[in-house]
Image (cartoon, grey):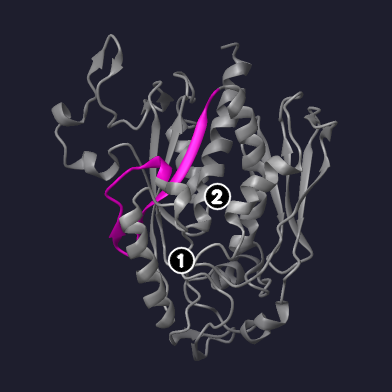
């Protein structure tokens, strides 16, 4: 089946293109009697909206969410929830010059290979604009998780090679990169401005923490909680790697170092990242994702056109310097969607 849907019992389908009329999402399987209105969704979309940082595109979208179905008198009804967000600042004509040429690092060449046709208006479905629907659905998932006292937060721990040392939760909302280290955030801003002048882009690392997750979520064998989390996060276009808990560091640890000792009060360390054998163990779930640099850069690159002729390209226009920090809330949303789905699956077995 086409890969536009995600989840099993709490299931979403996103739709729309970057420079089409609108983008949005249909959410099926949301339980009834959960408080929900546009303001709940809007609060999440504000964090994804362009123009919030030095790394962001100059595209100006209001990203106003409109709930079309599934909600009555501020409460979910159990029916499918449809949320639509209009594209107000689309400029498809800006991309006409790329209609017959493949942009390096983009999905242009692979979409052409798969379908024999592609929407060259900003990349169509392969554009990060598609994630608007994910974030809108993530707001609904977070409303469900809130009833279970589960909280999910994402923050920047590395950007352009600059790493956060401190983990101050209060600092996250006080800088444009949602970084828990104010000193690192200032260095990140300087780095972004330097690279922006050069016409280049940057990658980084986002960390996501889920607190209050009960033990027992996750399915054997192929729908392990960590497997679903990895799939959800890797489905975000700019994400190229996912690690949970100690992650790749566990490859160099000994078993005596990597195992989390169990005490009457719980685990004394959290190298597992809150998941054992694919099932949550009651600890915080800790995830990190590697975010690649934005592929649209002004520096000239080699490529080919539809006929296979060698060309060169310089992609100019309204583009982010880095997917961070706008991608943070997308990561947060995907983790929330996976947890909401597994909460529903756990309820289905009577636990």
Q: Is residue 207 above or below residue 18?
A: above
- Helix or strand or loop: what does disc 2 sit on? helix
Region rendered in magenta: 149-170
Q: Which residue is mark 2?
A: 330
Sequence-earlier tag: 2 or 1: 1
Look at the image and say whether residue 164 sits in the magenta stretch: yes
Q: Which residue is mark 1?
A: 322
Crowd band around label 2 with a 10 angstrom C-alpha radius: few (<14), some (14–19), many (20+): many
- Is residue 71 visible in the rendered image? The answer is yes
Question: Looking at the image, which residue is at 55% across and 73% down?
Answer: 319
Crowd band around label 1 with a 10 angstrom C-alpha radius: few (<14), some (14–19), many (20+): many
**Where in the figure is residue 326, as x and y percent of width and height?**
53, 57
Q: Which quadrant holds the C terminus? A: top right
Q: How many marks?
A: 2
- Say whether residue 13 is left or right of residue 271: right
Q: Is residue 89 above or below residue 310?
A: above
Tell me the quarter of the picture where residue 69 sits: top right
* Cα–Cα span, label 2 and label 1: 14 Å
- Say whether residue 317 is left or right of residue 286: right
Question: Looking at the image, which residue is at 63% across and 61% down?
Answer: 129
**Where in the figure is residue 9, as x and y percent of width and height?**
65, 29
- Helix or strand or loop: what does disc 1 sit on? loop
- Say whether residue 260 is left or right of residue 314: left
Q: Is residue 165 above or below residue 293?
A: above
Tell me the quarter of the picture where residue 7 sits: top right
**Where in the figure is residue 230, as x and y percent of width and height?**
45, 42
**Where in the figure is residue 250, as x and y percent of width and height?**
23, 39
- Is residue 3 visible in the rendered image? The answer is no
Residue 186 bears which disc, if any?
Answer: none
Look at the image and say whether residue 351 sits in the magenta stretch: no
- The outermost residue toward the top is 264
């Amino acid at each position: 089946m086409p890969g536009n849907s995600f989840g099993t019992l709490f299931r979403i389908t996103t739709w729309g293109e970057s420079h089409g009329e609108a983008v949005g999402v249909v959410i099926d399987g949301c339980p009834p009697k959960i408080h929900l209105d546009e303001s709940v969704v809007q609060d999440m979309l504000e964090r994804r909206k362009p123009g919030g940082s030095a790394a962001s595109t100059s595209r100006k979208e209001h990203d106003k969410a409109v709930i079309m179905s599934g909600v009555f008198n501020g409460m979910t009804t159990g029916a499918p929830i449809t949320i639509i967000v209009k594209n107000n600042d689309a400029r498809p004509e800006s991309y006409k010059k790329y209609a017959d040429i493949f942009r390096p690092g983009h999905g242009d060449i692979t979409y052409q290979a798969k379908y024999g046709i592609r929407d060259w208006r900003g990349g169509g479905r392969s554009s990060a604009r598609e994630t608007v629907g994910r974030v809108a659905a993530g707001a609904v998932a977070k409303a469900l998780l809130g009833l279970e006292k589960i909280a999910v937060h994402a923050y920047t721990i590395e950007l352009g090679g600059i790493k956060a040392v401190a983990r101050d939760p209060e600092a996250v909302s006080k800088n444009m990169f949602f970084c828990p280290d104010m000193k690192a955030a200032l260095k990140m801003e300087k780095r972004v401005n330097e690279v922006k002048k050069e016409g280049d882009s940057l990658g980084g690392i986002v960390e996501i923490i889920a607190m209050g997750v009960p033990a027992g979520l996750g399915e054997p064998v192929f729908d392990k909680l960590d497997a679903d989390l990895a799939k959800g996060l890797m489905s975000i276009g700019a994400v190229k790697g996912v690690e949970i808990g100690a992650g790749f560091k566990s490859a160099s640890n000994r078993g005596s170092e990597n195992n989390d000792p169990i005490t009457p009060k719980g685990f004394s360390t959290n190298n597992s990242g809150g998941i054992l054998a694919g099932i949550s163990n009651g600890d915080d779930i800790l995830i990190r994702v590697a975010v690649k640099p934005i592929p649209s850069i002004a520096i000239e690159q080699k490529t080919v056109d539809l006929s296979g002729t060698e060309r060169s390209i310089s992609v100019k226009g309204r583009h982010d310097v880095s997917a961070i920090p706008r991608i943070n809330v997308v990561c947060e949303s995907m983790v929330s969607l996976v947890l909401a789905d597994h909460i529903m699956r756990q309820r289905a077995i009577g636990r």
